[in-house]
Image (cartoon, helix red, strand yellow):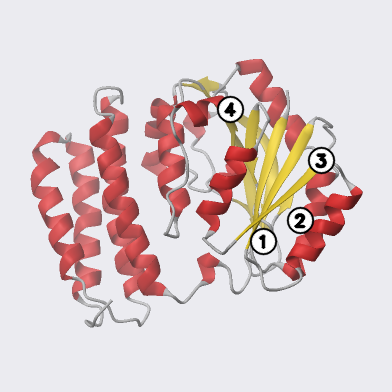
Amino acid sequence: MKVSIIIPVYNVEPYLDASLSSVLVQTMADFEVIAVDDGSSDASPAILQSYAAADHRLHVFTQANRGVSAARNRALREAQGDYILCVDSDDLLRPDALEQLCRCASKTDADIVLGRAQVRGADGAFYEMFPRPAALDGVQCLRGDLLYAALMPTLAFPSVVYQYLCKRKFLLENSLFFKEGIVHEDELWCAQVMCLAARAALTDACHYDYLPRAGSIMQSDNLAYRVESMFVVAQALREFVEAQRYYLSPAAHGWLMVRVFWLYRQMGRLAQRGHSLSADRYQAYFRGLLVKVFERLDGEIQEECLKYYRQGMFLLTNCSIGQL
């Protein structure tokens, strides 16, 4: 079983050595690394070439700056492994990450394996990201949409790409590429990947350390762009629900709609951070969506959608009004 580790790289000179080192010391030997330099202007390309010269498993590709989604899509097309694992170029992979994830994949023949990840807090300690509900203790493998519905009630659905080991064939057959031109693309991709997986496996192994840093997308103050990206994701997720409505379980269908309105609330939270934007278009879209779908949803799902809708409407109504 060969794994292709995908690493998009853009101006991460201070962090790239540590990240690449953590990847290349894996206890499992059968893997390749596909690194795509997305138009870096610092020393990142030179670091990549230095590592590639010393380790034949690292393959480096370059492109003009087009964003992380385009870099990952390029790597996915170049990859030759049976499975794909994405790693961000400023984070760390645990030494036995591939060994643990692939052991689970081999045992379950899963389309995706969901590992565990930790985030470094402001105090320097590490905390688990998206801790799973106790109801899933002992569960090894489920249909993906059923797993999604089991995770969402406690917001334990992991919307970060690096927690997923995926069969490359599964991704390609379902055209599961990353939406380009936006940020927060993980939010859409992870939901699609999980809900389309015929077999989604869980492992207790923690394989990844997420290290927040100043200047990253998630720390960016380009809030208008982030709000608009979340809106694009919400629309695309709604379209996905409609396209898959005859495949998805009723529970998954409902919780995906909850996620759409949760994104609306998140848009409002970002808008509250002092940047002006024009909220009318967003409010009109979600108002119309709620009217369209509300009667088709079950009681608990109705309540959750309405809760997030009201929160999003309040936050956007009370943000500064200007032009996006």
Does residue 188 appear left or right of residue 172 in this picture? left
Q: Nearer the viewer, mark 2 or mark 3?
A: 3
Question: As shown in the figure, which amino acid type bears the numbered disc 1?
Answer: Leu
Q: Secondary structure at mark 1?
A: loop
Q: Quadrant of the rendered structure where residue 121 is?
A: bottom right
Q: Is residue 49 visible?
A: yes
Question: As shown in the figure, which amino acid type bears the numbered disc 2?
Answer: Ser
The first of marks 4 and 2 along the sequence is 2
The first of marks 3 and 1 along the sequence is 3
In the rendered image, which residue does mark 4 sit on? 167
Q: Does the residue at mark 1 contact the one at mark 4 (Cβ under 8 Å)?
A: no
Question: As shown in the figure, which amino acid type bears the numbered disc 4?
Answer: Lys
Q: Which label sits on residue 57?
A: 3
Q: Nearer the viewer, mark 2 or mark 1?
A: 2
Q: Is residue 35 above or below residue 172?
A: below
Q: Residue at x 29, y 67 (%)?
A: 268
